[in-house]
Image (cartoon, coloured by chain):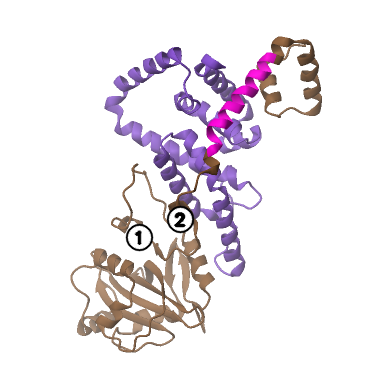
Chain colours: A purple, B brown
Amino acid sequence: MEETPQTVRLDGKGMNASLEHIREDLIALLPRLRRFARTLTRNVDDADDLVQLGLERALAKLDQWHTDSRLDGWMFRILKNAWIDEVRSRARRNRVLTSEEEGEQVSDAAHEAQEHALSVQAAMQRLPEEQRLAVSLVLVEGLPYREAAEVLGIPIGTLTSRLARGRESLQSMLSADV
Amino acid sequence: MKITDEQLMAYADGELDAQARRHVDAALASDPALAAALEKHRRLRRRVNEAFDPILAERVPDRLVSTLKANPTVVELATHRRKSAQPARRWSWPEWGAIAASLILGVIAGQSGWRSASGDMFTAHDGQIVARAELAKALSDRLASESAAEGIRVAFSFRSKQGDYCRAFTLGSSEAHASLAGVACYENEQWRMQTLARQTVQASSTPTYRQAASTLPTSILTTVSDMMDGEPLDVGAEDTARTQRWHK
């Protein structure tokens, strides 16, 4: 999605009315934004922090949203970017610890999956970032492939292969009773 | 013809056109293994939905709704100064987007009545909100001790830590039954807004420093105390600054 020309003008009442309108639409979207955030991070407070950051970023660049595109897709994209920024900056902070902890986590996951089926939420958290995003947008949020690919800024073919791999891993992690 | 797993997935997701769908339907009818694979896809989707859909019914935290409620009472332009007001976050977000000047102007315009005889008193310039018309004139010409005109009152003046001259002011509007309060600093020959707040109108007759300050919202005073170097200017210092056209 390329940056679009301003649709919010700096004067006049029309602009204010449309701002009001967008705010209302965003309020109506909040339950879905929270659901999407919870597929990215399981902790409720972290997820709501993510939504809040997304809203702040969205308000700061409302002039980049154009009314003929889907507001949900635009917001998912903002949330996704905010999440990735956060994950990356956390990864930088924790670099020293990463190798050890990650090794432990992987063996944990394998162990857990063998013992008993993981909860869907836990299984989602184990998916690689890109598969999780694809699964979340298509299966959880029900976006058409084309919209989901647009949110992620990738070709449809890439989306479907990530989706297929994500499904397969989820399936195997949940396999005990699937 | 063989149905690939991607085709089956697209079928389950309702992404196939009518012709491709008929094709898969036919294969499903004669291939129990394929039908079982489809059922697996569907069951996975159901499980995922059952896991996440209940979130839709949860009560949305107030803080998220209030982030979106129109007309934030205080809109800070100098984002690096917003240290004390924010509640601690669990995550350290890498950046805190500045609120776009266009949005703030929208809020101001929505109040109606922030216009003078010669037009809007605020305009955007280089991503900043700057004073114009009567507001710019009052900030340049009027001492804090002088009486208000056009609903504009300069509360006091001070120097910022960068050495710029800054002035706290209020701007009343009988039309909007509210007033704006703000801090503007003189930089590059312009009065640039550092912070703006909307407040309800308070009648105040004596424009002394105390009185003037008492009608400014706490958020503005907090910003001022963060920015200010030393004390507010006294009448003499203010007059001198005016004479040198607010140049550092």
Camera-side residue: A171 or B121? Answer: A171
Given the image, on which type of amino acid does mark 1 rest?
Ala
Residue at 41% from the left image edge and 38% from the top image edge: A85
Question: Label 2 marks which chain's residue?
Answer: B
Task: Please give the chain letter of the residue carrying mark 1.
Answer: B
Dot 1: element: loop
Number of residues whose C-alpha sits closer than 10 Å to that of mark 1, classed few (under 14), some (14–19) or many (20 or more): some
The image position of residue A124, as x and y in percent, is 49, 27
Q: Which residue is mark 2?
A: B67
Percent position of residue A47, x then y? 44, 40
Q: Secondary structure at mark 2?
A: helix
Is residue B204 located in the magenta-colored stretch of the structure?
no
For the residue pair A78 and A3, the one nearer the viewer reads as A78
| Residue situated furthest left in the rendering | B230
Q: Position of residue A116 (x, y in %)?
A: 45, 16
Which kind of residue does numbered mark 2 sit on? Answer: Thr
